[in-house]
Image: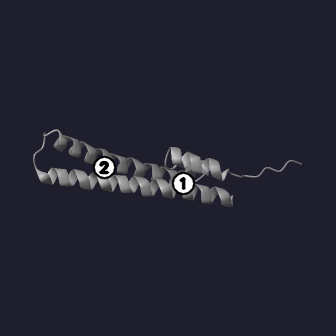
């Protein structure tokens, strides 16, 4: 009699989440959680890119107001922090969940 176990490799789950946030959760069978992480990652990447564009426009002299630079810096660093925090959470959560199974 062959018994199959639903075991997940914690290292692979962590690497998948490192490559793409939320992929480790999907690998672990947490589809909704993985899709939510992917959605928030996409949103934070969008915020980061908009901030980068505003900073780039200011550096090229396309916008002269300091308010746009301040907004660009705020969006840039907010997006960057959320990307990093969400990425670390995704990696550690995927590893922890795969270790329990």
Left-right relation of 54 to 35: left
Q: Position of residue 47 (x, y in %)?
A: 31, 49
Other residues around mark 2 within 10 Å, as few (<14) / some (14–19) / many (≥20)? many
> Does any portion of residue 23 appear in the rendered image?
no
Colouring convention used in this rendered image of the protein = one colour
**Which residue corresponds to the image point at 32% horizontal and 56% vertical from the top-left?**
78
Left-right relation of 68 to 82: left
Structural distance between the alpha carbons of marks 2 and 1: 22 Å
**Furthest-front residue in this view:** 59
> Does any portion of residue 11 appear in the rendered image?
yes
Q: Position of residue 15 (x, y in %)?
A: 58, 47
Q: Position of residue 18 (x, y in %)?
A: 52, 48
Of the pair 66 and 38, the residue shown nearer to us: 66
**Furthest-left residue in this view:** 64
**Which residue corresponds to the image point at 54% horizontal and 49% vertical from the top-left?**
17
Q: Earlier in the sequence, mark 2 or mark 1?
A: 2
**Which residue corresponds to the image point at 56% horizontal and 46% vertical from the top-left?**
16
Q: Position of residue 6 (x, y in %)?
A: 72, 52
**Furthest-right residue in this view:** 1
Residue 47, label in figure:
2
Residue 75, label in figure:
none
Q: Which residue is mark 1?
A: 91
């Amino acid at each position: 009699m062959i018994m199959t176990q639903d075991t997940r490799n914690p290292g692979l789950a962590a690497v998948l989440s490192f490559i793409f946030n939320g992929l480790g959760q999907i690998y672990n069978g947490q589809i909704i959680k993985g899709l939510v992480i992917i959605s928030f990652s996409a949103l934070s990447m969008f915020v980061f890119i908009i901030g980068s564009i505003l900073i780039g426009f200011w550096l090229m002299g396309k916008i002269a107001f300091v308010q746009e630079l301040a907004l660009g810096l705020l969006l840039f660093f907010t997006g960057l922090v959320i990307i990093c925090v969400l990425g670390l959470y995704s990696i550690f959560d995927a590893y922890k969940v795969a270790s329990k199974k």
